[in-house]
Amino acid sequence: MPLEHAQALTASRLADLRARLAPLFAATTLPITLEIGSGHGHFLTAYAQAHPDRFCIGIDLIGDRLERSARKSTRAGLANIAWLHADVRLFLEALPAEIRLAEVFLLFSDPWPKRRHWKNRVLQPEFLSQLAERTGEGARLYFRTDHAPYFSHALNCVGEHAGWALAPDEPWPFELATVFQLRAEGHQSLIARRTCSIGQSH
Ligand SMILES: C[S@@+](CC[C@H](N)C(=O)[O-])C[C@H]1O[C@@H](n2cnc3c(N)ncnc32)[C@H](O)[C@@H]1O
């Protein structure tokens, strides 16, 4: 695809996402919980049900998983949850400037085992920087995977990033097995706390 065409497509997707986000944030003043790659929606639906004091947003690239998720949350009668068909990087770019995320879950993110595909992993230093700009001090990132090399990569990225600090003594905040967790033989979890050493300090 020619570069100009690709740029025009990204700009139009960004405008569309901004238009979809504006009414969501206009309708809530609750702290915002984001789940990236929310898959079939089991985790976030249960989380939103247990936390009526949060507004939960699940995003994924796969439309029919989001449709199933929406059916679950509608059946549960939840008003504090929304599902978005979007790439997380575009979502973070489209967030209104004044919005700060309070907590972010990244559960069983695609591990991309082959070295030449590692660049496709969601958790990267650049992603942590982008996320740091859209979270306030004290925000939390919760990461869980069944892929040991991705876990080591995540530990290194967070450990070396000025905007985040590992919080090894904190308990996992909410247990509800996701679809991929149920298929896994085991998993490892990491909690990162947003520090105020880079970007904005609120
Ligand atoms: C391995 S599945 C895990 C789904 C769910 N978290 C679970 O544990 O059952 C990873 C999910 O992340 C989504 N995903 C991958 N990259 C993404 C991105 N850049 N933005 C949003 N979602 C993404 C995929 O579409 C997929 O549904």
Image (cartoon, grey):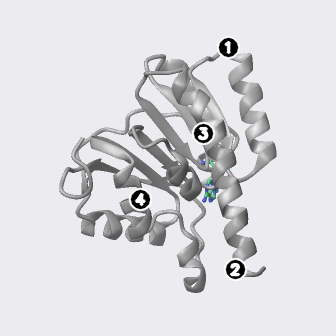
Furthest residue toward right: 64
Q: Where does the image place residue 1, in percent across and percent down from the top left?
A: 78, 79
Q: CA distance from mark 1 to mark 3?
A: 16 Å
Residue under numbered circle 4: 130
Nearer mark to the viewer, of 2 and 3: 2
Residue at the spot x=46%, y=52% of the render?
144
Q: Is mark 3 within 8 Å of ligand 1?
A: no
Q: Is residue 187 above or below residue 138?
A: below
Residue at the spot x=56%, y=35% of the render?
57
Furthest residue toward top: 77
Residue under numbered circle 2: 3
Q: Is residue 125 above or below residue 109?
A: below
Name the element at disc 3.
Answer: strand
Residue under numbered circle 3: 58
Residue under numbered circle 1: 77
Q: Is mark 4 within 8 Å of ligand 1?
A: no
Q: Looking at the image, is mark 2 or mark 3 earlier in the sequence? A: 2
Q: Looking at the image, is mark 4 or mark 3 earlier in the sequence? A: 3
